[in-house]
């Protein structure tokens, strides 16, 4: 079945460091891909998405490119802030259902 | 984005009792909703999908008689964990979809601890 694999955390960075959180997927066909973010005490929020190969989703300085050849959707940000500390989930839509990765906790220190 | 609330945010109960969790969409009407559970350091696992006014569709391995879902209206859904046991302790999250792009809006979750 469809699945999403993302790097284990926590990822610990200093403010203004470069961020990469890896995500790869296995799916039948060409799913839409998502990154969700969960801030402490809040629900998951859609961060960005891409619906077809080579699409780049971007929001709040975060970017991810849909790479069909490597079945990847890595999340990147050039300069993280303390306020980016959260749990990040990679996900895909397969058969109209969201399939999530296990989540990666990001901790950014001043 | 759309706002979804859950109540309670945290509940502790004794083994054998039933617990009801409410999920409300505050600023939009949604026809399809989802219930997930999340174990520590694990992914969200879909439990069931339901459309307003119809019975929920449960995922394989989820006991429908144990996890009762009532999608009473376009803004309210409830999950009742019946005869809860310690192994039911988990984080339960609801979500609604409000458009054709499969975007889901999530509640903040309810942490259930069964003693």
Image (cartoon, rainbow, N blue to C red):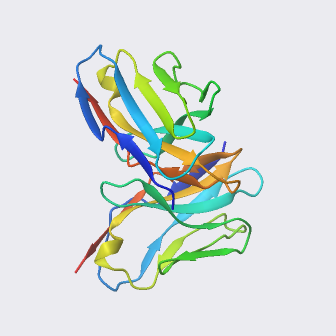
Q: Is residue B52 above or below residue A48?
A: above
Q: Quadrant of residue B33?
A: top right
Snapshot quadrant of residue A96: top right
Residue at x-position 35% and y-position 35%:
B90
> Nearest the camera: B26 or B51?
B26
Establish if B89 lies above or below B41: above
* Residue located 48% across and 39% down the image: B36
- Residue A83 at x, y percent in the picture: 31, 74
Q: Position of residue A8 (x, y in %)?
A: 40, 58
Return the residue nearer the eye: B65 or A25. B65
Q: Residue furthest right?
A: A29
Q: Horizontally, is B42 left or right of A34 in the view?
A: left
Q: Residue at x 29, y 82 (%)?
A: A15
A53 over B15 or under it: above or below? below
- Residue at 56 percent of width and 34 percent of height: B73
Residue A44 can be seen, yes or no = yes
Instruction: Report if residue A13 is visible in the image.
Output: no
Left/right placement of residue B100 relative to residue A107 reads right
Q: Give the percent coordinates (x, y) of residue B4.
A: 45, 49
Quadrant location of residue A39? bottom left
Q: Is residue A79 left or right of residue A61?
A: left
Residue B84 in percent (x, y) is at 34, 19
* B107 to A49, vertically: above or below: above
Q: How many marks?
A: 0
Name the image quarter holding the C terminus of chain B: top left
């Amino acid at each position: 079945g469809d699945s999403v694999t993302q790097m284990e955390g926590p990822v610990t960075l200093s403010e203004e460091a470069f961020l990469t959180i890896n995500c790869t997927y296995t799916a039948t066909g060409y799913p839409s891909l998502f990154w969700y973010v969960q801030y402490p005490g809040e629900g998951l929020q859609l961060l960005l998405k891409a619906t077809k190969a080579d699409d780049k989703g971007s929001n709040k300085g975060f970017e991810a490119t849909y790479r069909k050849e490597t079945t990847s959707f890595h999340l990147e940000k050039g300069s993280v802030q303390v306020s980016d500390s959260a749990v990040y989930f990679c996900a895909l839509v397969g058969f109209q259902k969201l399939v999530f990765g296990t989540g990666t906790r990001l901790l950014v220190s001043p | 984005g759309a706002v979804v609330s859950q109540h309670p945010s945290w509940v502790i109960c004794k083994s054998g009792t039933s617990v009801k969790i409410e999920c409300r969409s505050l600023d939009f009407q949604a026809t399809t909703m989802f219930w997930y559970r999340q174990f520590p350091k694990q992914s969200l696992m879909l439990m069931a999908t339901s459309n307003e006014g119809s019975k929920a569709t449960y995922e394989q391995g989820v006991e429908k008689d144990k996890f009762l879902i009532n999608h009473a209206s376009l803004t309210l859904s409830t999950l009742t964990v019946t005869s809860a046991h310690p192994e039911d302790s988990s984080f339960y999250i609801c979500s609604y979809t409000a458009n054709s792009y499969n975007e889901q809006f999530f509640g903040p979750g309810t942490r259930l601890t069964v003693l």
